[in-house]
Image: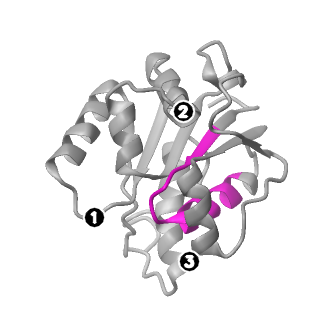
Amino acid sequence: MAENRKIIVAVTGASGSVYALSLIRRLAGLKSPPTEIATLFTETAKQIWHHETGEAFHGMPPVRIYENNDFFVPFASGSSDYDTMIICPASMGTIGRIAGGISDDLVCRSADVMLKERRRLIIVPRETPYNLMHIRNMETLTLAGAVICPASPSFYSRPETINDLVMTVVERIISLAGFEADTYRWMKND
């Protein structure tokens, strides 16, 4: 992918703030990081983030925080140059609204823009088990061009800590987003 990438990371009201925190830190620390990491939080995500991490989120360059009710931002339009959106963690309510074409907040509108412009949309659901509506909504989004990447850690690399497990998911997301990831590869690192 091209240099000078701008991406969006949306955090919704599902448990799993540790995935989003690790993802944002990893993206910002890449050898060639995006020029901007636009971050969006739903109101519930802010509460869950604080509960799970013990503090509020603070942006630092290249991370920029946008309000979820502000439609006067560049990536609310297909004419913007943001090429990737990652929703991590993705609540089933947000997934359902996106699958239904309901753009009632900036997270859903931005996802709609990614789909209509045929840009990369990576959705990281953090829910278990799935019910039939969850599966149908994820099917709809897959058919529309999104990539569903459940927050399901892998064990191939023999992780030893919770952070190691989290990073198996984060590194997969980084790779799906088209960034160079120096990560464990099955039967390549043994």
Q: Do the residues labelled 3 and 1 touch (CB within 8 Å)?
A: no
Which label's residue is closer to the chain start, 2 or 3?
2
From the viewer's perspective, is the residue at label 3 or at label 1 nearer?
1
Magenta part of the chain = 8-27
Query: In the rendered structure, which amino acid carries the disc numbered 3?
Result: Asn
* Number of numbered discs visible in the structure rendering: 3
Q: Which mark is residue 147?
A: none
In the image, is residue 21 part of the stretch drawn in magenta? yes
Q: Name the residue under label 3.
A: 163
The residue lying at 27 percent from left, 28 percent from top is: 143
Quadrant where the image shows the C terminus: bottom left
Q: Name the residue under label 2.
A: 105
Residue 77: x percent and y percent? 62, 17
Q: Is residue 160 above or below residue 72?
A: below
Q: Mark 1 points at which residue?
A: 128
Res. 158 in view: yes
In the image, is residue 20 part of the stretch drawn in magenta? yes
Q: In this view, does 169 lie to the left or right of 32?
A: left
Query: In the rendered structure, which amino acid carries the disc numbered 2?
Result: Asp
What is the CA distance from the residue labelled 1 to the residue labelled 2?
25 Å
The residue lying at 19 percent from left, 39 percent from top is: 136
The residue lying at 63 percent from left, 38 percent from top is: 68
